[in-house]
Amino acid sequence: GAVVSQHPSWVICKSGTSVKIECRSLDFQATTMFWYRQFPKQSLMLMATSNEGSKATYEQGVEKDKFLINHASLTLSTLTVTSAHPEDSSFYICSAQLSLSGLAGDEQYFGPGTRLTVT
Amino acid sequence: EDQVTQSPEALRLQEGESSSLNCSYTVSGLRGLFWYRQDPGKGPEFLFTLYSAGEEKEKERLKATLTKKESFLHITAPKPEDSATYLCAVQGIGGSNYKLTFGKGTLLTVNP
């Protein structure tokens, strides 16, 4: 149980184009999903918190107009990188909160990640 | 601001050689401390959640312990398949609900 999928697993796009990444919780409903990015040999940095049916909450320094997040259902969140540039190349990982109690402290389950390369 | 420091950055062990990884943290109030395993090019895999000082959890060759300032991940008689980066994260009472703050991880290599 508690499986999270991401699609695509890798994508190469040209500078100036937009890319959409999907995150799905396969066997549970997740009211809260998270988007992280990870640079080589660095830890995960939270970009935004996504709640179903409401606007995402972005971390300081993350451009909300560049990284569009939509959480349309309890099992799907999407991250769209708009007008991508080479510096946006990174490993993007989503997670979903398995919240049986509705309390913070429940573990997050992570997707396999999406490798984005912008040329 | 919550902070997590993991040590060592990298650790090489021979198969069967037990050791421990350290995770030191500062939070205004701890909701939970989490351990994850991450293989290259993959997302983190959940291992343990610890909530209060003195708590211990075990899974196969791994045991996680927690004090008020740090957590240890003990690896007993490791095997090559235990090679991975181990990440520690905390969830504090202050700031955004549910937010995890990660350490940089410890890269564990177990040689046969």
Image: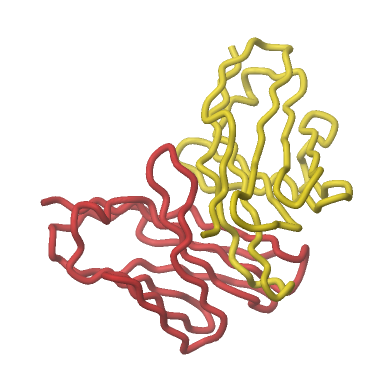
Chain colours: A yellow, B red
Residue at coordinates 48% horizontally, 76% vertically from top-left?
A: B70
In the rendered image, the quadrant that contains the N terminus of chain B is: bottom right
Q: Is residue A88 above or below residue B105?
A: above
Nearer-the-camera pick, A47 or A20:
A20
In the rendered image, which quarter is residue A12 located in?
Answer: top right
Residue A53, horizontal then vertical, whole percent = 87, 50
Snapshot quadrant of residue B30: bottom right
Left or right: residue A20 versus residue B38 is right
Q: Position of residue A105 (x, y in %)?
A: 64, 72
Outermost residue on the front side: it is A27
A20 left or right, relative to A8: right
Given residues B13 and A34, the one toward you in this image is A34
Compared to residue B88, the image places residue A35 above or below, namely above
> Is B17 positioned to the left or the right of A1 in the image?
left
Query: What residue is at 73 percent from the left and 12 percent from the top?
Result: A16
The total of numbered circles placed on residues is 0
Q: Residue at x 78, y 47 (%)?
A: A73
- Residue that extends furthest to the right in the rendered view of this protein: A54
Q: Position of residue A95 (x, y in %)?
A: 62, 51
Q: Residue at x 57, y 28 (%)?
A: A8
Question: Outermost residue toward the bottom?
Answer: B54
Q: Tell me where residue B3 appears, x and y as whole percent.
A: 60, 63
